[in-house]
């Protein structure tokens, strides 16, 4: 399935059905009176975050989403049926903006959240609604109200526990393929990864979701290379895994290049917990590893882990370090238990 993280969609809610002008006409009933029913209400346009989706590709080919119109009222006081709603299913993490792309309408960060983007028009009143003591035979009814039409922009921010950042060709896709069932394209040239990739990682019987985004280069926040477009996908991550290629000339400078781009993007990413890893240790001598680790330690102000994603050396230690931070942040953000949950045997 192709990955798409932005989509422009035209939506329209249903029109309300028209009210009916009718009179009761039965044998032996001389003055039956008005019996026109009301029109049905138009359907709404509803967006819901569902499980099992991680792309907006459906809305590249279904750019018009319309709810059904309400049915008109009928005689014998029969009201029209309401129009069916239009349900748009999107991945968790989808944000909905107005056409300008700046005014946020909704942020569906969790599975099950839903929002009504456009309400359907109300149905018109039939003539039975207008009967009074002085007007016993009204011949007027209301038309149904029109639905709402608008253009919205859907923007997806992937939901992952950890996000991998680094320069192009730092070994991010190799690491993801090593620790999960994801099979991203791997090659020895920059920008092999053009779209974010997700993988479920199992470590010590516990799972977490890892996201690999395309590599960043200097000036990415200004749109150079693939730009900062994909940095939005690691905004919701609990921890960043910063991979540094050990075969570059200076690991510390490579680290600072990425940190500069994260700072330019905003405080959302720069303040996140970070685990720094020197990758491709299998291609280095012990002396080179020691030198690059020292450079990386000075630049990052922390002791980096050493790993070779290609042969799996040091990978378990990196996964355990990731899960340690993920577990801590999950515990810190977990809601406090209610009395009902405690009575039911709730455990942290």
Image (spheres, rainbow, N blue to C red):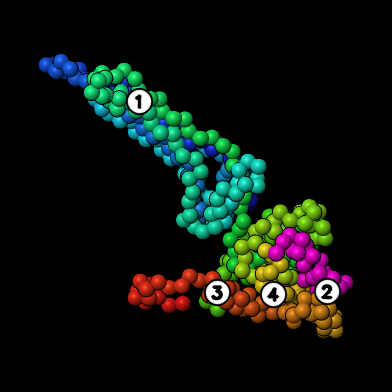
Pick whichever of labels 4 and 1 is earlier in the sequence: 1
- 10 Å neighbourhood of mark 4: few (<14), some, or many (≥20)? many
Main secondary structure along the magenta-highlighted residues: helix
Pick whichever of labels 3 and 2 is earlier in the sequence: 2
Residue at the spot of label 2: 252
Residue at the spot of label 1: 19
The boundaries of the magenta stretch are: 244-267
- SS assignment at label 4: strand
Regarding residue 246, the answer to whether it shows in the image is yes
- SS assignment at label 3: helix
**In the image, which disc is placed on residue 275?**
4
The x and y percentages for residue 255 are 79, 70
Distance (Cα) linking label 2 and label 4: 14 Å
Residue located 20% across and 17% down the image: 25
Is the C-beta separation of discs 1 and 2 under 8 Å?
Answer: no
Q: Comparing marks 4 and 1, which lies closer to the viewer? A: 1
**In the image, which disc is placed on residue 332?**
3
Q: Comparing marks 4 and 3, which lies closer to the viewer? A: 3
């Amino acid at each position: 399935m192709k990955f798409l993280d932005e989509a422009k969609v035209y939506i329209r809610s249903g029109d309300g059905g028209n009210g009916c002008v009718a009179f009761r006409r039965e044998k032996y009933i001389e003055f039956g009176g008005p019996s026109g029913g009301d029109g049905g209400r138009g359907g709404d346009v509803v967006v819901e975050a569902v499980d099992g989706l991680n792309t907006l590709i459906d809305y590249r080919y279904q750019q018009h989403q319309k709810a059904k119109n309400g049915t008109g009222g009928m005689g014998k006081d029969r009201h029209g049926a309401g129009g069916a709603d239009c349900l748009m299913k999107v991945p968790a993490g989808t944000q909905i903006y107005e056409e300008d792309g700046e005014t946020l309408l909704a942020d569906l960060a969790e599975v099950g959240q839903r929002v009504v983007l456009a309400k359907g028009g109300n149905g018109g009143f039939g003539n039975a609604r207008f009967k009074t003591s002085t007007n016993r035979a009204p011949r007027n009814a209301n038309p149904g109200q029109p639905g709402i039409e608008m253009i919205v922009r859907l923007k997806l921010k992937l939901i992952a526990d950890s996000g991998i950042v680094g320069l192009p060709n730092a070994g991010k896709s190799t690491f993801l393929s090593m620790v999960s069932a994801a099979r991203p394209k791997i090659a020895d040239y920059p920008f092999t990864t053009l779209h974010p990739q997700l993988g479920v990682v199992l470590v010590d019987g516990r799972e977490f979701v890892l996201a690999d985004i395309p590599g960043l280069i200097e000036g990415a926040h200004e749109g150079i290379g693939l730009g900062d477009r994909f940095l939005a996908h690691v905004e919701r991550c609990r921890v960043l895994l910063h991979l540094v290629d050990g075969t570059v000339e200076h690991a510390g400078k490579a680290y600072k290049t990425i940190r500069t781009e994260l700072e330019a993007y905003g405080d959302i990413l720069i303040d996140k917990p970070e685990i720094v890893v020197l990758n491709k240790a299998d291609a280095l001598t012990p002396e080179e590893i020691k030198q690059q680790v020292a450079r990386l330690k000075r630049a990052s102000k922390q002791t980096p882990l050493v790993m070779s994603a290609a042969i799996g050396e040091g990978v378990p230690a990196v996964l355990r370090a990731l899960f340690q931070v993920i577990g801590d942040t999950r515990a810190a953000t977990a809601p406090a238990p209610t009395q009902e949950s405690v009575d039911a045997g709730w455990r942290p």
